[in-house]
Amino acid sequence: MLSTEGRRRLAAGGMFILPLFLVKATSVMLGGAGPVETQAATTEDAPIGTTQVIAGPKSNEEAQILAAEHITSLENQPFGVSPMYYETHGQVESTEIEHPEEDPPPQFKIRGILSASAGNTALIDGKPYRVGDELADSGWRITEIDGVARSVTIKDSKTGRTETRTVQ
Protein backbone atom coordinates (compact mmCIF):
# COMPACT_ATOMS: atom_id res chain seq x y z
CA MET A 1 0.00 0.00 0.00
CA LEU A 2 1.31 3.46 -0.92
CA SER A 3 1.41 6.28 1.57
CA THR A 4 -0.33 9.58 0.95
CA GLU A 5 2.97 11.16 -0.10
CA GLY A 6 3.68 8.26 -2.48
CA ARG A 7 0.23 8.58 -4.11
CA ARG A 8 0.73 12.34 -4.50
CA ARG A 9 4.09 11.81 -6.26
CA LEU A 10 2.66 9.10 -8.50
CA ALA A 11 -0.25 11.38 -9.51
CA ALA A 12 2.13 14.30 -10.24
CA GLY A 13 4.35 12.07 -12.38
CA GLY A 14 1.33 10.67 -14.21
CA MET A 15 0.04 14.16 -15.03
CA PHE A 16 3.43 14.95 -16.57
CA ILE A 17 3.94 11.69 -18.48
CA LEU A 18 0.35 11.11 -19.73
CA PRO A 19 0.27 13.98 -22.31
CA LEU A 20 3.65 12.92 -23.70
CA PHE A 21 2.44 9.34 -24.03
CA LEU A 22 -0.79 10.42 -25.77
CA VAL A 23 1.08 12.55 -28.33
CA LYS A 24 3.50 9.74 -29.14
CA ALA A 25 0.71 7.14 -29.40
CA THR A 26 -1.29 9.40 -31.75
CA SER A 27 1.79 9.92 -33.92
CA VAL A 28 2.34 6.18 -34.25
CA MET A 29 -1.34 5.55 -35.07
CA LEU A 30 -1.35 8.21 -37.79
CA GLY A 31 1.70 6.64 -39.42
CA GLY A 32 4.48 9.16 -39.22
CA ALA A 33 5.73 12.39 -37.82
CA GLY A 34 3.51 14.63 -39.93
CA PRO A 35 3.32 16.09 -43.43
CA VAL A 36 7.07 16.10 -44.04
CA GLU A 37 6.89 14.43 -47.45
CA THR A 38 4.08 16.56 -48.91
CA GLN A 39 4.70 19.36 -51.36
CA ALA A 40 2.45 21.91 -53.00
CA ALA A 41 2.43 22.87 -56.67
CA THR A 42 0.22 24.95 -58.88
CA THR A 43 -1.53 23.16 -61.70
CA GLU A 44 -3.60 23.92 -64.72
CA ASP A 45 -6.77 21.98 -65.32
CA ALA A 46 -6.04 18.82 -67.27
CA PRO A 47 -8.30 17.95 -70.17
CA ILE A 48 -11.09 15.54 -69.22
CA GLY A 49 -10.04 11.93 -69.57
CA THR A 50 -6.29 12.58 -69.12
CA THR A 51 -4.11 12.22 -66.10
CA GLN A 52 -1.86 15.06 -65.00
CA VAL A 53 1.29 14.32 -63.04
CA ILE A 54 2.36 16.94 -60.52
CA ALA A 55 6.07 16.91 -59.98
CA GLY A 56 7.79 18.97 -57.34
CA PRO A 57 11.46 19.82 -57.15
CA LYS A 58 13.70 16.78 -56.84
CA SER A 59 16.32 18.36 -54.57
CA ASN A 60 16.83 21.30 -52.28
CA GLU A 61 19.03 22.99 -54.88
CA GLU A 62 16.24 22.76 -57.47
CA ALA A 63 13.75 24.15 -54.91
CA GLN A 64 16.05 27.10 -54.22
CA ILE A 65 16.40 27.82 -57.94
CA LEU A 66 12.61 27.74 -58.37
CA ALA A 67 12.20 30.07 -55.37
CA ALA A 68 14.78 32.51 -56.78
CA GLU A 69 12.98 32.52 -60.15
CA HIS A 70 9.68 33.20 -58.41
CA ILE A 71 11.17 36.13 -56.48
CA THR A 72 12.65 37.53 -59.69
CA SER A 73 9.23 37.34 -61.38
CA LEU A 74 7.67 39.29 -58.47
CA GLU A 75 10.09 42.20 -58.92
CA ASN A 76 8.25 43.31 -62.08
CA GLN A 77 4.87 43.58 -60.37
CA PRO A 78 3.52 47.11 -59.77
CA PHE A 79 3.50 46.92 -55.96
CA GLY A 80 7.22 46.38 -55.55
CA VAL A 81 9.14 43.48 -54.11
CA SER A 82 7.36 43.42 -50.77
CA PRO A 83 4.15 44.82 -49.32
CA MET A 84 6.42 46.56 -46.82
CA TYR A 85 8.46 48.19 -49.60
CA TYR A 86 8.61 51.98 -49.37
CA GLU A 87 10.27 53.95 -52.10
CA THR A 88 11.87 57.21 -51.07
CA HIS A 89 11.49 60.21 -53.36
CA GLY A 90 14.56 62.38 -53.04
CA GLN A 91 16.36 63.77 -50.04
CA VAL A 92 14.64 65.35 -47.08
CA GLU A 93 16.09 68.74 -46.32
CA SER A 94 16.71 69.73 -42.75
CA THR A 95 15.00 72.94 -41.76
CA GLU A 96 15.58 74.86 -38.60
CA ILE A 97 12.79 76.73 -36.93
CA GLU A 98 13.73 80.03 -35.43
CA HIS A 99 12.35 80.55 -31.96
CA PRO A 100 12.00 84.05 -30.65
CA GLU A 101 14.23 84.68 -27.71
CA GLU A 102 12.26 84.30 -24.54
CA ASP A 103 13.02 86.33 -21.50
CA PRO A 104 13.77 84.12 -18.53
CA PRO A 105 11.22 84.41 -15.74
CA PRO A 106 12.25 86.67 -12.89
CA GLN A 107 14.06 85.07 -10.00
CA PHE A 108 12.07 85.44 -6.79
CA LYS A 109 11.16 83.55 -3.64
CA ILE A 110 7.64 83.11 -2.38
CA ARG A 111 7.74 83.38 1.40
CA GLY A 112 4.06 82.81 2.12
CA ILE A 113 0.44 83.07 1.00
CA LEU A 114 -2.19 84.88 3.01
CA SER A 115 -5.84 83.95 2.51
CA ALA A 116 -8.51 86.56 3.28
CA SER A 117 -12.11 87.25 2.32
CA ALA A 118 -10.91 90.02 0.00
CA GLY A 119 -8.64 87.56 -1.88
CA ASN A 120 -5.28 85.87 -1.55
CA THR A 121 -2.03 87.76 -1.14
CA ALA A 122 1.43 86.34 -1.87
CA LEU A 123 4.52 87.51 -0.02
CA ILE A 124 7.24 87.55 -2.69
CA ASP A 125 10.69 88.74 -1.66
CA GLY A 126 9.10 90.42 1.37
CA LYS A 127 6.54 92.43 -0.65
CA PRO A 128 2.78 91.72 -0.89
CA TYR A 129 1.36 90.96 -4.36
CA ARG A 130 -2.22 90.25 -5.48
CA VAL A 131 -3.67 88.79 -8.70
CA GLY A 132 -3.02 91.22 -11.57
CA ASP A 133 0.08 92.83 -10.04
CA GLU A 134 3.31 93.00 -12.05
CA LEU A 135 6.40 91.43 -10.51
CA ALA A 136 9.03 94.13 -10.00
CA ASP A 137 8.63 95.75 -13.47
CA SER A 138 9.65 92.51 -15.22
CA GLY A 139 6.70 92.14 -17.59
CA TRP A 140 5.43 89.10 -15.68
CA ARG A 141 1.97 89.40 -14.05
CA ILE A 142 0.43 87.27 -11.31
CA THR A 143 -2.57 85.41 -12.75
CA GLU A 144 -3.41 83.09 -9.85
CA ILE A 145 -2.60 82.67 -6.17
CA ASP A 146 -3.61 79.22 -4.86
CA GLY A 147 -3.72 79.06 -1.05
CA VAL A 148 -4.37 75.28 -0.94
CA ALA A 149 -1.50 74.32 -3.24
CA ARG A 150 0.60 77.18 -1.83
CA SER A 151 1.52 78.29 -5.35
CA VAL A 152 1.61 81.39 -7.54
CA THR A 153 1.08 81.35 -11.33
CA ILE A 154 2.73 84.11 -13.34
CA LYS A 155 2.32 85.02 -17.03
CA ASP A 156 4.68 86.85 -19.39
CA SER A 157 2.75 89.70 -21.00
CA LYS A 158 4.96 89.59 -24.15
CA THR A 159 4.87 85.87 -25.03
CA GLY A 160 1.91 84.58 -23.02
CA ARG A 161 4.06 81.91 -21.39
CA THR A 162 2.98 80.87 -17.88
CA GLU A 163 4.84 79.37 -14.94
CA THR A 164 3.72 78.14 -11.54
CA ARG A 165 5.95 78.39 -8.50
CA THR A 166 5.39 77.11 -4.95
CA VAL A 167 6.23 78.50 -1.53
CA GLN A 168 9.89 77.88 -0.69
Image (spheres, helix red, strand yellow):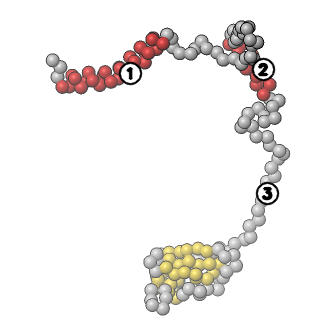
Query: Is residue 84 visible to the viewer in this orientation of the structure?
Result: yes
Q: Earlier in the sequence, mark 2 or mark 1?
A: 1
Q: Taking 146 as reference, is 7 left or right? A: left
* Residue at which label 1 appears: 19
Depth order, front residue of 134/117: 117
Question: Residue 155 location in percent, x, y?
Answer: 62, 78
Type of amino acid at the residue the image marks with label 3: Thr
- Tell me the quarter of the picture where residue 161 sits: bottom right
Amino acid beneath label 2: Glu
Q: Which residue is pictured at 49% across the width and 10% down the height? A: 31
Residue at the spot x=49%, y=79% of the render? 146
Find residue 143 and report its horizontal and vertical position in percent. Answer: 58, 81
Q: Where is residue 160 in the image (x, y as percent from the top left)?
A: 66, 76
Up/down of 96 relative to 6, above or below: below
Q: Earlier in the sequence, mark 2 or mark 3?
A: 2
* Contact, mark 2 vs mark 3 (Cβ under 8 Å): no
Inspect this view and state whether residue 167 appears.
Answer: no
Q: Name the residue under label 3.
A: 95
Q: Give the quadrant of the N terminus.
A: top left
Determine the CA span between mark 2 and mark 1: 44 Å
Q: Which mark is residue 69?
A: 2
Position above or below: 9 against 149: above
Q: Which amino acid does label 1 sit on?
A: Pro
Decide which of 35, 96 is in the foreground and name it.
35
Residue beneath the point at 59% across and 78% down: 154
